[in-house]
Amino acid sequence: MPGMDIYRFDALVVGAGIGGATAAAHLAPTRRTALLEAEESAGYHTTGRSAAIWILNYGTADAQLLTAASGDFFRNPPPGFAEVPLMSPRPVVHLARADQVPVLEAMMAAGNGIEAITPEAVREMAPALRPGYAVAAGIERHAFDMDVAALHAGFLKQVRAHGGVLALRQRAGRIWRGSGLWHAETSDGSVFAAPVLVNAAGAWGDEVAQLAGVAPLGLQPKRRTALIVDPAPYDVSSWPLLDDVEHQWYARPEARAKLMVSPADETDSDPCDAQPDELDVAIAVDRFQRALDIEVRRVEHRWAGLRTFTPDRSLAIGPSGTPGFFWNCGQGGYGIQTAPAAGRLLSMLVNEDDPEGLRDIVPMVDPRRFAKENA
């Protein structure tokens, strides 16, 4: 358009959370990439509010496969990727009340490496567990904490190292395709153009698609609440993550001396800067205190984030059916632990490379599956 400053790239990625940062980092070595972010900082929404633990047996089949394929990256990241380790061991214990034993048995039968452990053994690891609360338990010993900030910063550093650009405070207000290029006009009037546009806008993914004239997927953001409590007099630094087997609550050590508690809520929400609801905070405290002999005198901090799901809860990674428009959305609660493999898969699909060991995942995450269902 006459008079507009147009910045040309080989790929545009909308959204600089973990999905966008990982996609851009994998595209940048072969395509000069611009990463467009509406907020003042990258990862302000979901990425910065994650529970940050890698659990192999968590989520849909595609999420578990992508999680497994990402494990080695966390354990052995590329030289210089981060100044601190990306992972530290943290077992996960699934607790079952008497009425939940069949759920635990089914989880252990279908899972990978979940071992039975007695409630007494759990109490040795987490002495505050109330006697009689759980009659059975399973443990995943291979789980680990993830340093989300270091992971996210490492991918952004890779983007810049390959000549990519992180454009903050650049909300896309108009998106159109012309002369074989996608154009995104941002909030300051700048126009970024490239033959490829990757929609990694998280909760705003459908809005970005509609701006571009691409059919939305039916993404549904869901609010998840978390809070920090003081577990005194207990030293919780070496405790496992304790999880209700039906995922009605969980608690995990935070900053060594505190516990992060969540009611594991999934409340439908519009895309927004999510805030905690007092009822969800109260539910979290009640469920936590039923399981653990820790009196919550004060909630030290509370927050909420949005986890965005596709209609079938599997991820959406790949082409849209509209030339040059790709999806990297619908990560739900698995975005951090799947990020390395998901970004690699996205770049392979954009570049039409053989997805190698990720080939079986492609049909599971193909965004075009929703168009076929609606045809």
Image (cartoon, rainbow, N blue to C red):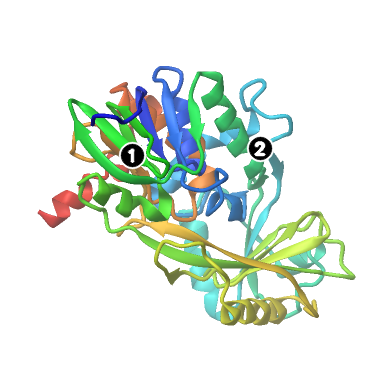
* Of marks 2 and 1, the one in the foreground: 1
* Picture quadrant where residue 323 is located: top left
Residue placed at 32% from the left, 37% from the top? 184
Q: Is residue 237 visible?
A: yes
Image coordinates of residue 78 in percent, x first then y, are 61, 23
**Nearer-the-camera pick, 319 or 216:** 216
Q: Secondary structure at mark 1?
A: strand
Image coordinates of residue 254 in percent, x first then y, are 74, 57
C-alpha separation, residue under disc 2 versus residue under disc 1: 31 Å
Q: Which mark is residue 155?
A: none
Neighbourhood count class around disc 1 (C-alpha, 10 Å): few under 14, some 14–19, many 20 upward: many
Q: Earlier in the sequence, mark 2 or mark 1?
A: 2
Query: Taking 327 as reference, is 129 above or below it?
Result: below
Q: Are marks 2 and 1 in contact (CB under 8 Å)?
A: no
Amino acid beneath label 2: Ala
Q: Is residue 69 visible?
A: no
Amino acid beneath label 1: Glu
- Pointer 1: what residue? 185
Neighbourhood count class around disc 2 (C-alpha, 10 Å): few under 14, some 14–19, many 20 upward: some
Query: Taking 44 as reference, is 67 above or below it?
Result: above
